[in-house]
Image (cartoon, rainbow, N blue to C red):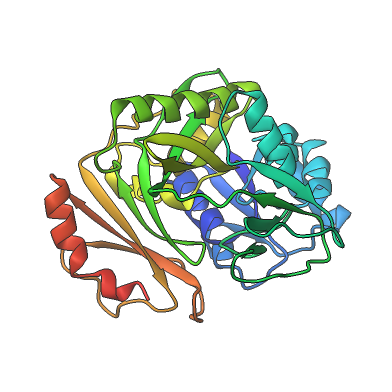
Amino acid sequence: MKVGILGAGQLGRMLAGAALQLGLEPHLYDPETQACGHSAGRSWPFSYEDQDSLERFARTVELCTFEFENVPVSAVQTVSRYSLVAPGMAALAVSQDRLHEKNFLRTLGIGTPDFQAWVPGAELPPQGILKTRRFGYDGKGQWDLSRSRPQPGVTCICEEKLAFQRELSQIGVRSRSGEIACYPLVETIQREGILCEAIAPARQVSQELVNQARLWVTKILEALDYVGVLALELFEVDGQLLANEMAPRVHNSGHWTDRGCRTSQFENHWRALLGWPLGDTEALGHCRLINLLGSVPEVPPPGVHATYYGKEARPGRKLGHLTCLADTPEAVDEISSGVLSHAT
């Protein structure tokens, strides 16, 4: 069976790898000719505005997904005329605009930081986090107003600046049949807006918060009639959860599942799209994911699994990740302490 992926970055590459393991034939469409995922399947290096190529691609594959939420809506609409596309347009419409996303979350009873819309030329509040409504990722397109006073030329959302204790991530998956499964709640460590480490399961978290995170991601999946993997990024503030944002795709905070779970997020994404029974999301032990930013070790540390993305090195770029797995949190901490210096 031929399956399509819009986007051929590292997420597309890992999705393609999972597709191959399931006996599927992945086709990756991305205008970036040097994208690392092109080598993982049949490459389609054409523009998202190239209607003829998009139509040929869509007629070639039986179903299609996307690796990032900012894929042009027009491209998804074109492909969906000839092939089954999931997650669908509803998820894209919500996630591509931070203001719409926050309003959507609140209609579901999901708490968020306080926020307000901001347009160019309007007065900036004295403090808060200013974020572009569209196209922001990895800390790009956002400013701490207590440190700088930008004047972006695009519409933004201004959020309350929280004194949160930590960031968490809840990944859920919903099948075409309506079956839902959740992965363990993950603690994430960010630096300058980039995810550097993920600890799974999250340390010293109450069952109440675990249940709340699962309830929230389930509400989102059902409200959007969602098919596939979705990540909900969260803040923990004084023992309570607030939603930061959602990502309608496989997510960096779930890369550890490839080695640390019975069924990875990538395999379950395809299972959901195909309508197959979802795989077991139970963790095999305790895990720590370490992103490799800017450089990679010449030799992976003993007992640590290395995944490289095949990208050209440059400062701050995600080039791969290391996965440390052990039976106890203490053992994982001991293993990871010796390799954190590689994540520069």
Image-based side of 323 in relation to 112, left or right: left
x, y percent for residue 115: 67, 44
**Residue 116: x %, y % from top left:** 73, 45
Give x and y (percent) for residue 207.
30, 26
Where's residue 70, x and y in %?
Answer: 70, 52
Is residue 292 among the parts visible in the rendering? yes
Picture layout, residue 8 above or below residue 242: below
Task: Please give left or right for residue 32 compared with residue 301 in the image.
Answer: right
Question: In this orientation, does residue 91 appear?
Answer: no
Residue sitting at the far front: 126
Observer-nearest of 67 and 340: 340
Give 113 or 326, whichever is nearer the viewer.
Answer: 113
Quarter location, residue 99: top right
Q: Quadrant of the N terminus?
A: top right
In which quadrant will I find the C terminus? bottom left
Name above or below for residue 335 compared with residue 343.
Answer: above
Residue under the image location 52 percent in, 37 percent down: 229
Q: Nearer the viewer, residue 235 or 78?
A: 235
How many marks the image carries: the answer is 0
Left or right of 320? Residue 161 is right
Q: Quadrant of residue 220?
A: top right
| Residue pictured at 26% horizontal, 43% vertical | 203
Depth check, front residue: 329 or 108: 108
Locate residue 247 relative to residue 29 in the image: left or right.
left
